[in-house]
Image: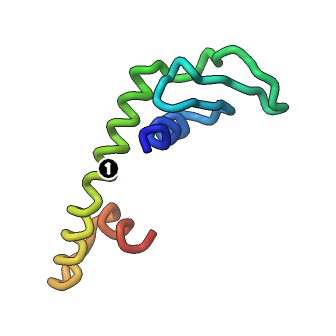
Amino acid sequence: MATAFYSHAINKLGNWNYKLNGEDLSTLIFYDDNGNEITRPSDFPTNEQIETAKTEEQTRLDNIPNLKASAKAKLVAGTPLTEEEANTIVL
């Protein structure tokens, strides 16, 4: 599951063609649009940026149950939902 978080974090930070094996960021292999292996792009995020994005995604996922509960309470009470709350029940 952690590999998915790394991939999501990388994709959130930009658009690159790459392969990642497990949770070891040193295993990243980059490809050009033709599928040829290339060196790490200069605009690729640092490992620290990737870790931050991964943590943010985990926090977002951990908060979904709270947002759903809040959305349900607001629907029952007839009060407006935030966009984030609405996204938990519509998307």
Q: Secondary structure at mark 1?
A: helix
Q: Residues within 10 Å of mark 1 (few under 14, many from 20)?
A: few
Pointer 1 residue: 60
Image quarter for residue 78?
A: bottom left
Q: Residue furthest front?
A: 22
> In the picture, residue 72 is in which quadrant?
bottom left
In the rendered image, the quadrant that contains the C terminus is bottom left
Please tell me whether residue 63 is drawn above or below residue 4 in the rendered image.
below
x and y percentages locating residue 47 in the rendered image: 45, 20
Give the residue at the far right of this rendering. 34
Could you say which is closer to the camera, residue 70 or residue 36?
Answer: 36
Residue 83 lies, in percent from the top left, at 34, 64
Question: What type is the residue that disc 1 sits on?
Answer: Arg
Q: Position of residue 44 (x, y in %)?
A: 57, 22
Quadrant placement of the N terminus? top left
Taking the spot 25% from the left edge, 55% from the top edge, the residue there is: 63
Horizontal relation, residue 10 to residue 35: left or right: left
Residue at image point 35% right, 67% down: 88
Is 15 situated above or below 67? above
The image shows a total of numbered marks equal to: 1
Q: Is residue 61 above or below residue 80?
A: above
Instruction: Kindly identify the residue that appears in the image at 24 percent across and 72 percent down.
Output: 71
Q: Residue at x 50, y 23 (%)?
A: 25
Q: How is the image coloured?
A: rainbow
In front here: 49 or 62?
62
Which of 82/35 is in front? 35
Residue 36 % position (x, y): 81, 25
Say whether residue 80 is left or right of residue 42.
left
